[in-house]
């Protein structure tokens, strides 16, 4: 059960992606964020105390049912429920909502997260697609269906112009498995595209090649400006493609498949949130200054320590890190402030306090991937290192009253924004709050990548389990040499055949065969030749029978046949003659020799009125076989009918 803490509540209240409501009895709202307030045309305070049922046009009974279950503490989730909300000016707003049971102040409450579908952006569409893909992963058990339906989701739900899923073959070409586009003409052209991963070719330098090489998602926000993708510029112009994304799907540490997404929007994978982040960084800077000033007043730290720039090297650190008189205070009091802000938005890559020389005083990061551009070192763990030494970045820490934004690409093509907001202490520039902002959608795409990779590995495990299960079944019920059913399988089948004969009141027969002159084959040519003869005989027996007949190998050179609903003895004799004819054909050996074998057979005929067991039938057929072999010289046929009848 989710417990709503103050920090989680603050994150929900500051989210720009969802409308958020926490409610109690009768749907009475006790918490509402700006997202839901803006959606409905109110401010947050005006919503407190109202019932959210008032804003929903859906049947009231259904809403009340959900409220009752929530407040009873039931842990069930209603995801992607479609509601129609009524705003302050009476306009109707289509909303996709997820509702949860949460604990707040030791009591169960309802939590609703809502997305305004009339204003869906790419982030929300991908969020919905992630939910749909996760549902697929639970239901679908084969790769082909999973890959095809994910392509459908990217086009139909997210709204991309086209999606291709394929794999890299031994010739370094991107071989397409499925193609999905908004129209058939587009699909036809996509199927003709040549895409590869060989950088020495003009078609091997695009996002697919980069994703394949790095095993990471690769974005191209302006395909017409990317010279490496000039090979496809004619295609991009024809269908107004302006951005692309390649998502490698990893299985067993290899790129198994790649999803290639095309969209008509430039910067399709980027949302500019500069104003929001600047406001957040300024708020953080204000909190930092307030905490520092209070500490100075209380005597916890001196004013001179705050401005200490005597960077003392820390031993045994590589790259080299440093410490000042301000470091311990920062760790205790400033770091928690930045931690809080970093959790507010999942697309924030880092939140850093730097002094006016570019040294990191306090840092946190949710991203351990290397950065590029001016900051090529990984930020994680690099506290008290001078990694922000660029002129633009230092200017915001030294002499800027406003803020500065820098944009640079990461290794995977994702555009990053580094936003710097100055920190003033006692009216002097102390340093800056630096915020690294990535793309909202990147995190969701990465989650899709991980989930699909996991699904493929799960499907592979299930497939291998089924293969193993089938191998065990074959080992248990089939003869390894001839591939025919074995004694165990024969016993099961004979019981079923008896039951069918009794039910349908038809006659059946069981015949036991032993090969004549087989021992000399082993003695003369070896057991390998004998095995080869048995394999050939097994195939000939199967080909001599009707589809409804059954043949099994007991072991050695003994075989058993089951004949169901044979009609009369004359029909059986025709089959017996065909068996003899096929068996007596010489068998060619690998050493260019050929051998001939004969056969003896004992047959037991069972009338439908007889009450007999499978063991008894086999025993009578075996007795008949014994008599047949005892009278090889004076018998007129190779088979003998059992004398014992019940």
Image (cartoon, helix red, strand yellow):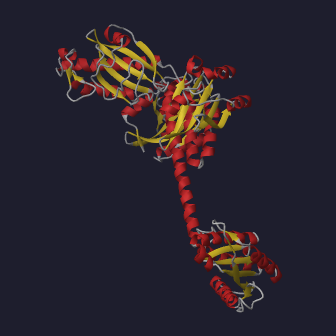
Q: Is residue 295 left or right of residue 510?
A: left
When asked about the image quadrant of residue 8, the answer is: top left
Q: Is residue 98 visible?
A: yes
Residue drawn at x 21%, y 19% as measured from the top left: 311
Q: Is residue 444 visible?
A: no
Number of residue marks: 0
When asked about the image quadrant of residue 538, the answer is: bottom right
Residue extending farthest front? 592
Q: Residue 112 location, x and y as percent? A: 50, 36
Between 429 and 587, the residue placed more toward the observer is 587
Residue drawn at x 71%, y 70% as measured from the top left: 540
Between 517 and 608, the residue placed more toward the observer is 517
Q: Residue 646 location, x and y as percent? A: 71, 91
Between 92 and 380, the residue placed more toward the observer is 380
Quadrant where the image shows the N terminus:
top left
When asked about the image quadrant of residue 337, the answer is: top left
Q: Is residue 503 left or right of residue 326?
A: right
Residue drawn at x 63%, y 23% as measured from the top left: 232
207 up-or-down from 522: above or below: above
70 up-or-down from 95: above or below: below
Q: Residue 526 location, x and y as percent? A: 57, 73
Q: Residue 249 location, x and y as percent? A: 53, 38
Between 124 and 158, the residue placed more toward the observer is 158
């Amino acid at each position: 059960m989710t417990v709503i803490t103050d920090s989680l509540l603050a994150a929900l209240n500051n989210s720009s992606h969802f409308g958020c409501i926490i409610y109690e009895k009768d749907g009475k709202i006790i918490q509402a964020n700006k997202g839901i307030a803006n959606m409905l045309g109110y401010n947050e305070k005006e919503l407190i105390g109202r019932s959210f049922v008032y804003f929903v046009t859906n049947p009231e009974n259904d809403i009340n049912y959900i409220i009752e279950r929530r407040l009873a503490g039931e842990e069930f989730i209603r995801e992607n429920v479609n509601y129609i909300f009524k705003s302050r000016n009476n306009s109707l707003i289509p909303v996709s909502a997820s509702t949860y049971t949460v604990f707040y102040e030791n009591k169960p409450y309802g939590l609703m997260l809502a997305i305004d579908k009339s204003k869906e952006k790419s982030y929300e569409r991908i969020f919905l697609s992630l939910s749909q893909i996760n549902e697929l992963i639970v239901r679908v058990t084969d790769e082909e269906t999973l890959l095809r339906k994910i392509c459908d989701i990217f086009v139909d739900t997210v709204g991309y112009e086209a999606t291709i899923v394929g794999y890299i073959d031994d010739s370094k070409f991107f071989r397409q498995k499925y193609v999905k586009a908004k129209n058939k003409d587009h699909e036809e052209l996509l199927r003709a595209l040549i895409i590869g991963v060989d950088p020495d070719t003009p078609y091997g330098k695009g996002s697919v090649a980069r994703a394949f090489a790095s095993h990471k998602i690769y974005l191209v926000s302006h395909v017409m400006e990317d010279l490496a993708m000039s090979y496809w510029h004619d295609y991009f112009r024809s269908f107004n493609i302006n951005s692309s994304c390649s998502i490698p799907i990893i299985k067993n540490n290899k790129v198994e498949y790649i999803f290639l997404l095309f969209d008509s929007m430039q910067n399709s994978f980027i949302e500019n949130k500069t104003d929001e982040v600047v406001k957040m960084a300024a708020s953080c800077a204000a909190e930092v200054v307030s905490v520092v000033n209070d500490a100075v007043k209380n005597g916890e730290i001196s004013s001179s320590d705050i401005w200490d720039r005597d960077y003392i090297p820390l031993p045994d650190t590589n790259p080299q890190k440093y410490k000042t008189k301000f470091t311990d205070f920062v760790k205790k009091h400033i770091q928690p402030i930045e931690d809080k802000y970093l959790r507010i938005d999942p697309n924030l890559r880092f939140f850093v306090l730097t002094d006016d020389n570019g040294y990191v005083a306090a840092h946190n990061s949710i991203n351990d991937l290397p950065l590029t551009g001016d900051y090529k070192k990984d930020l994680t763990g690099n506290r008290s290192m001078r990694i922000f030494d660029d002129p633009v970045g230092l200017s915001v820490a030294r002499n800027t009253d406003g803020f500065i934004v820098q944009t640079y690409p990461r290794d995977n093509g994702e555009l990053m924004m580094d936003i710097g907001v100055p920190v003033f202490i006692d009216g002097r520039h102390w340093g800056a709050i630096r915020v690294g902002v990535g793309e909202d959608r990147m995190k969701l795409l990465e989650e899709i990548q991980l989930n699909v990779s996991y699904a493929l590995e799960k499907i592979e495990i299930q497939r291998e389990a089924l293969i193993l299960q089938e191998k065990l079944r074959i080992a248990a019920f089939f003869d390894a040499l001839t591939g025919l059913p074995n004694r165990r399988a024969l016993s099961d089948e004979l019981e079923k055949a008896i039951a069918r004969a009794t039910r349908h009141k038809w006659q059946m027969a069981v015949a036991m065969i032993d090969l004549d002159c087989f021992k000399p084959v082993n003695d003369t040519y070896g057991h390998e030749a004998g095995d080869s003869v048995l394999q050939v005989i097994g195939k000939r027996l199967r080909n001599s029978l009707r589809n409804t007949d059954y043949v099994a190998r007991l072991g050695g050179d003994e075989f058993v046949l089951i004949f169901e609903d044979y009609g009369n003895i004359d029909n059986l004799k025709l089959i017996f003659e065909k068996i003899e004819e096929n068996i007596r054909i010489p068998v060619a050996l690998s050493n260019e020799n050929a051998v001939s074998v004969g056969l003896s057979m004992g047959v037991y005929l069972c009338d439908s009125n007889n009450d007999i067991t499978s063991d008894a039938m086999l025993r009578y057929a075996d007795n008949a076989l014994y008599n047949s072999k005892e009278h090889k010289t004076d018998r007129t046929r190779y088979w003998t009918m059992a004398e014992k009848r019940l």
